[in-house]
Image (cartoon, helix red, strand yellow):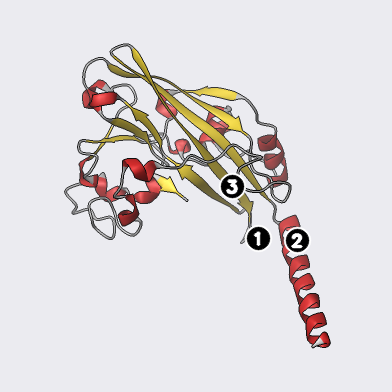
Amino acid sequence: MKRLGIAVAVTTICIGVVILAYHVAYPSLTLRYRLTLVAEVDDQPKMGTSVVEVTYNEQPEVGSGRNLVFGHRGEAVAVELGERGTLFALLVAGDDIRSAPETIVFRAFGFPGGIFPQGSVEDGFRRIRQLSGKRELQLDSLPMLVRFRDMNDPKTVERVHPHNLAERFGPGSKLVRAELEIVATDSWPLSSGHFAGEPLTTGIEKRLSWLPQFYDRMLDGRRYQAASSELQLANSLASGAFMAP
């Protein structure tokens, strides 16, 4: 039994060394930001925010060039417009492909091309770690904006143009501004839970109770995207556009 215990301990240490070596050779970086949208309805301000976490992982190179894998967690921004409905800024890019959750930060802070910094991954991580404060976003650089004609029916999803809220929400409604702010991030193992960092936004499933039913299917009920779908927008979105655990 003693030998078995020693063997288990040695194996555990070896695995830990391998994992540590991998993370040293292929580092990752995690960042959190708060995206805020401010709208007006009949001159009355309406605001919605969401804290999103993005991760950039360097992976072993295949061929030439850098191999980066991006990921994100969080929820869409929801802006309550009273009886007019709710505006959502999704976790997917809008007309500007750089408005995806992992790249909108680069767009907001004026990185050349709105993409991950050129040069080595280490230099890119260094530049990202130095980001702080808040920046105003051009409305054309926002993620995809949508609303539902009926919040209980995912098939009724509609695109919303950032410069023409009145088309979907009626006269007197407009999107005024948007800003992105870097916030504190959990830094395991120095902290745990959300106590050291800004907590991620949760609770969107309370607004859209049907979300858990659409992780493996599109909002029009189909399993996959299909050119034949009569509801092309609903056929292009699933729960992941609203919530990424």
Local crowd size for mark 2, using a 10 Å CA cut-off: few (<14), some (14–19), many (≥20): few
Q: Position of residue 130 (x, y in %)?
A: 70, 32
- 42 up-or-down from 221: above or below: above
Q: Is residue 164 visible?
A: yes
Label 2, label 3: how many angstroms apart (C-alpha)? 18 Å
213 on left or right of 113 = left
Q: Which mark is residue 20?
A: 2
Dot in front, 1 or 2:
2
Q: Position of residue 129 (x, y in %)?
A: 69, 37
Residue in the picture at 41% in, 42% down: 203
Label 3, label 1: how many angstroms apart (C-alpha)? 16 Å
- 171 up-or-down from 52: above or below: above
In the image, 83 versus 21, the foreground residue is: 83
Do callouts 3 and 1 mark residues in contact (Cβ within 8 Å)?
Answer: no
In the image, 58 versus 6, the foreground residue is: 6
Residue in the picture at 39% in, 39% down: 90
Q: Which mark is residue 55?
A: 3
In the image, 151 versus 120, the foreground residue is: 151
Residue that extends furthest to the top in the rendered view of this protein: 43
Q: Give the quarter of the image for residue 75.
A: top left
Q: Which mark is residue 60?
A: 1
Label 1, label 2: how many angstroms apart (C-alpha)? 15 Å
Q: Position of residue 180 (x, y in %)?
A: 52, 28
Q: Which mark is residue 188?
A: none
Q: Give the quarter of the image for residue 222.
A: bottom left
In the image, 93 versus 115, the foreground residue is: 93
**Kind of residue at badge 2:** Leu
